[in-house]
Image (cartoon, rainbow, N blue to C red):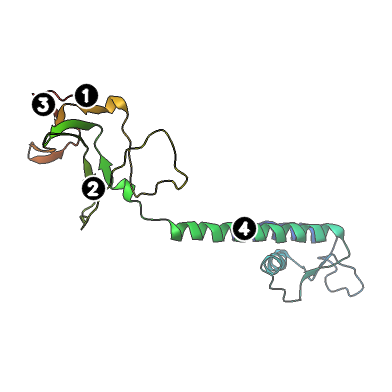
């Protein structure tokens, strides 16, 4: 659509310029110094626009050196066509190189909990996969990050963060699946405080 719009827009400019300079009425006059040569209507002006921007150049229609404004329009169209080419290539590259949006199919629990397991304090969180096809041989790696950024950065498919008020001490996760009115309901935020207090 961008290409078609620019072809039509510059075709109208060429047609209007040829009409103002009387190139259309003198198209078959060999003595006439035309600015837009062999432009006798809008279709021929559209062909001139298409041939100029796509560098086809059949030779029947052209912008001559008899008017500086025609040269200026041709330069603007050439630059604009190059910009559109660069944008289109960039858009296609971004579209083909973009990874799958796995972050939209993975959800994390709103809170994480800290409780004692096997005699040690553990930080627990929940991750849910919303896709119908389950992940096979999944590996999960969690990192505790302070307020500093490494020079290498961190790359992952999905990530989340927990602030201090979202970490629940002495809690554990309850079963996230329940049956409600014949429909299974999944709630990743269900937590329950433990009877024994955890040491801070």
Tag 2, which secondary structure?
A: loop
Tag 3, which secondary structure?
A: loop
Residue wearing tag 4: 84
Residue wearing tag 2: 130
In the displayed structure, 103 sits above or below 76; it is: above
Closer to the observer: label 4 or label 2?
A: 2
Could you say where residue 170 lies in the image, as x and y percent from the top left? 16, 26
Q: CA distance from mark 2 to mark 3?
A: 29 Å
Q: CA distance from mark 4 to mark 2?
A: 39 Å
Which one is earlier in the sequence, the residue at label 3 or at label 4? 4
Q: Nearer the viewer, residue 174 or 167?
A: 167
Residue wearing tag 3: 194
Q: CA distance from mark 3 to mark 4?
A: 62 Å
Q: CA distance from mark 3 to mark 1?
A: 14 Å
Which one is earlier in the sequence, the residue at label 1 or at label 4? 4
Residue wearing tag 1: 200
């Amino acid at each position: 659509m961008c290409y078609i719009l620019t072809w039509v827009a510059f075709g109208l400019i060429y047609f209007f310029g040829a009409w103002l300079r009387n190139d259309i009425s003198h198209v078959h006059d060999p003595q006439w110094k035309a600015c837009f040569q062999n432009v006798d209507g809008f279709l021929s002006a559209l062909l001139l626009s298409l041939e100029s921007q796509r560098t086809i150049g059949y030779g029947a229609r052209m912008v001559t050196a008899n008017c500086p404004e025609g040269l200026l329009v041709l330069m603007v169209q050439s630059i604009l066509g190059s910009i559109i080419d660069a944008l289109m290539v960039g858009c296609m590259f971004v579209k083909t190189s973009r990874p799958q949006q796995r972050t939209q199919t993975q959800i994390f629990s709103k809170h994480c909990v800290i409780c004692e397991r096997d005699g040690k304090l553990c930080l627990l969180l929940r991750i849910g996969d919303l896709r119908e096809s389950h992940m096979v041989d999944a590996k999960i790696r969690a990192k505790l990050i302070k307020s500093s950024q490494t020079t290498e950065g961190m790359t992952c498919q999905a990530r989340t963060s927990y602030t201090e008020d979202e970490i629940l001490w002495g809690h554990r996760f309850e079963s996230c699946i329940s049956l409600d009115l014949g429909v299974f309901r999944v709630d990743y935020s269900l937590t329950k405080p433990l009877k024994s207090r955890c040491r801070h």
